[in-house]
Image: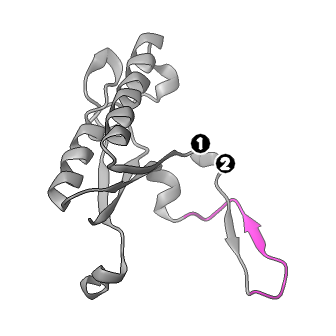
Amino acid sequence: MPKFLLMVNHDGGVFEEPMDQWEPGDIAAHFNYYEVLTKELTESGEMVQFMALADPRLTKIVRSDGSAAPVVTDGPFPESKEVLAGFNVFDVESEARALEIAARISAVPGPGRVPTQQPVEVRQVMSDDSQGDL
């Protein structure tokens, strides 16, 4: 079965206010939605890995030539620092199933329990049998 990486964007979808400005009940509903969805997809055997990422301000860039001490900076950043909030890896029957799961992730509730419509990027993970798809 193909594996897909689903990357959840850090932007609030249809909401501009950051989560720390939401009502406590809305925050709880947001995380409860993820908890229920994660349990379902783990029990089905489709979820391989889930990771939420820390605040983007904590990001570092590392560059190394392999011999000198690495250079660690807090910028400039590629766009992923600004947008990537977390990621999931799923082992599913098809791309259509990965897109279906991405739609459910995008519908996570925000303020007023309204779906956030956060963008979710879907990308197939390369495997030995998919190298011809480069």
* Residue positioned most to the right: 69
Amino acid type assigned to the residue bearing label 2 in the image: Leu
Magenta region, main secondary structure: loop
Residue in front for this viewpoint, 42 or 34 = 42
Q: Is label 2 in contact with label 1 (beta carbons under 8 Å)?
A: yes
Residue 46 position within the rendered picture, expressed as x and y whole percent measured from the top left: 32, 49
Residue in front for this viewpoint, 6 or 17 = 6
In the figure, residue 105 lies in which quadrant?
top left
Residue in front for this viewpoint, 104 or 71 = 104
- Whole-angstrom CA distance, mark 2 to mark 1, is 6 Å
Residue 130 position within the rendered picture, expressed as x and y whole percent measured from the top left: 28, 80
Q: Identify the residue shown where x is 32% and y is 34%.
A: 40
Q: Identify the residue shown where x is 77% and y is 73%.
A: 71
Judging by the rendered image, the residue that carries numbered circle 1 is 55
Is 108 magenta? The answer is no
Chain part drawn in magenta: 66-77
Q: Compared with residue 102, is residue 125 higher up or lower down, i.e. above or below?
A: below
Amino acid type assigned to the residue bearing label 1 in the image: Asp
Quarter of the image with the N terminus in it: bottom left
Judging by the rendered image, the residue that carries numbered circle 2 is 58
In the figure, residue 107 lies in which quadrant?
top left
Q: Identify the residue shown where x is 55% and y is 46%.
A: 53
Q: Identify the residue shown where x is 73% and y is 87%.
A: 65
81 horizontally vs 30: left or right:
right
